[in-house]
Amino acid sequence: MSDLEHRIAVARGEAPADIVLKNGMIFDLMTGELIAGDVAIVGDRIAGVFESYEGKREIDVTGKILVPGFIDTHLHIESSLVTPFEFDRCVLPRGVTTAICDPHEIGNVIGAAGIRYFQEASQHTLMDIKVQLSSCVPSTHMETSGAELLAEDLAELMGHPSGIGLAEFMNYPGVIYRDPEAMKKIRLYEDAHIDGHCPQLSGRDLNAYISAGIRTEHEATTVEEAREKLRKGMRVLIREGSVSKDTHALQPLLTHFTAPYMCLCTDDRNPLDIGEYGHLDYVIRTLIELGSPALAVYRAATLSAAEAFGLKDRGMIAPGKRADIVVLDSLERCNADMVFAGGVEVNDAAFAARGHVAPVGRGSVKAPQVRAEDFRTTGNREEVDVIGILEGKIITEHLKETVPIVDGDKAPDPARDLTRITVIERHGKNGNIASGFVKGFGLKAGAIASTVCHDHHNIACVGVDYDDMALAANRLSEIEGGFVVVKDGEVLAELALPVAGLMSLLPFEDVRDQLVDLRAAARTLGVTLEEPFLQLAFLALPVIPALKITDRGMVDVTKFEIIS
């Protein structure tokens, strides 16, 4: 018999299934009921549910609850700081069976080769990784990136089995003012899926953005903003990353009425937060704890996500669907006892049997050697623009402070929490260095530097001691990128990220442990932020209001221009 005929025969009880999960309670996402019955699996598909079945392998799941595999609807795997293969091993055992990723981080460093790397990796991971094509490489004209992807470049990447559509269109001014290149990219996917990214956009400008065919939005940070976007037909993705934490703010909006049009995503989440708190399982637990109905939450995590992205083959435990199944101890705790991805039980043997793709993007850090004097700021005005950090958010405040000019320099002032922030071009294109001020780190000594610097991924460095800042930035060139903490001329902690300056070649457990050391080292400098490294990375993203910095200078995002 063919696979199709065999599956039908198994569903009728005429042949044994490959695997049967017996005696569990299936969470029915249509009615909200917990229904006793077996689940019969044939190959990568579910053949039958709720009835009694026999199988070549039978697994007793008495007392357990079966739910569909979770779908992360928007993330950048690079921000997990590990390769797609280690991300697979880190997150899949927690129940995330589908990840819809945008590889624009590596795309901004090495271009199409980075996206092809993710496409190839997706064919070997146990988790089903869907690779959206990055729409904004670079994100704006106000930064220097390692590569540029035009519409014709994206056209050559289309058609891969992992593809769904066009990833987050961050250049929302380019959409609403009809930039010709933006229009070319949108026309490529005019009848397909296009992800959105339009923080704080509203009114007629929001209408204009959505009218381009853009369907989803993960940047809403308030109920009011999310409600307007829902009313105008966008699917709102509740985000909980390592920096952007919107679950508490948006939870009141997730009800039985809105659940069909809301999804969950992580965007940027590192292995330390995953290890300490969880991934989508953490978001699910938190939403239920805050009062959202379990049915609404699990719909958002599974069926609603599948429907939003046109994945008709998943999102339910039902005949004919992909056998993406999470076996839980309870709906409220959301602890995965067992996970099946495409009918494969997730365990060490299954991970060991995967294929592999060689990493790319080595030797990508080509920054100039810097000296202490490169971090001085000159000028004849004592009033300065200051980036004001809002912890738990990637939006910032645009503050004004007065800094006296001493010996031709406006120096950091730890007593006022005014820290120097500098971005150094590291792609070997122009050697740009731009400096400004940031408030919110609590830094009292030393420096922190990183090549994870959204989305251009130049070197970002914060500090109050110029010698330490120079040491930290130069050390990043030596280790092919990563994170560095320096104090009094000594490197206290570091994490090398040699894959495009973004990802480690180490197991995720080792990366997690080194992040623990980095956070501890940062605290010795006086840092008060829970996640200083990714917080630093987002201070250089000029598509998120209100004030940011790139290698070309301070950026007023609301005006979409570099401050002269």
Image (tube, rainbow, N blue to C red):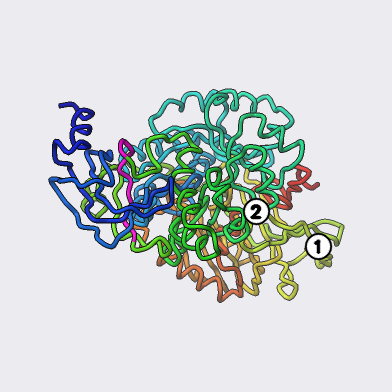
Quarter of the image for residue 41 reads: top left
CA distance separating discs 2 and 1: 41 Å
Residue 384, which numbered label? none
Residue 513 at x, y percent in the picture? 40, 67
Quarter of the image for residue 59 reads: bottom left
Using residue 420 as the reference point, say whether residue 129 is left or right of it: left
At 65% from the left and 74% from the top, the residue drawn is: 444
For marks 2 and 1, the one nearer the N-term is: 2
At 82% from the left and 56% from the top, the residue drawn is: 379
Residue 408, which numbered label? 1
Query: For numbered disc 1, what is the local secondary structure?
Result: loop
Residue 115 on the magenta segment = no
- 375, 46: nearer the viewer: 46
Query: For numbered disc 2, what is the local secondary structure?
Result: loop
- Amino acid on which the number 2 mark rests in the picture: Thr
Residue 484 at x, y percent in the picture? 51, 63
For mark 2, what is the residue?
A: 221
- 218, 425: nearer the viewer: 218
User: Which segment did they paint magenta?
Assistant: 319-328
Q: Is residue 87 visible?
A: no
Q: Is residue 541 visible?
A: yes
- 307, 356: nearer the viewer: 307
Residue 185 at x, y percent in the picture? 59, 27
Residue 257 at x, y percent in the picture? 57, 47
Crowding at label 2, few (<14), some or many (≥20) Cα neighbours within 10 Å? many
- Amino acid on which the number 1 mark rests in the picture: Gly
| Dominant SS type (magenta) | loop
At 53% from the left and 31% from the top, the residue drawn is: 193
- 105, 501: nearer the viewer: 105
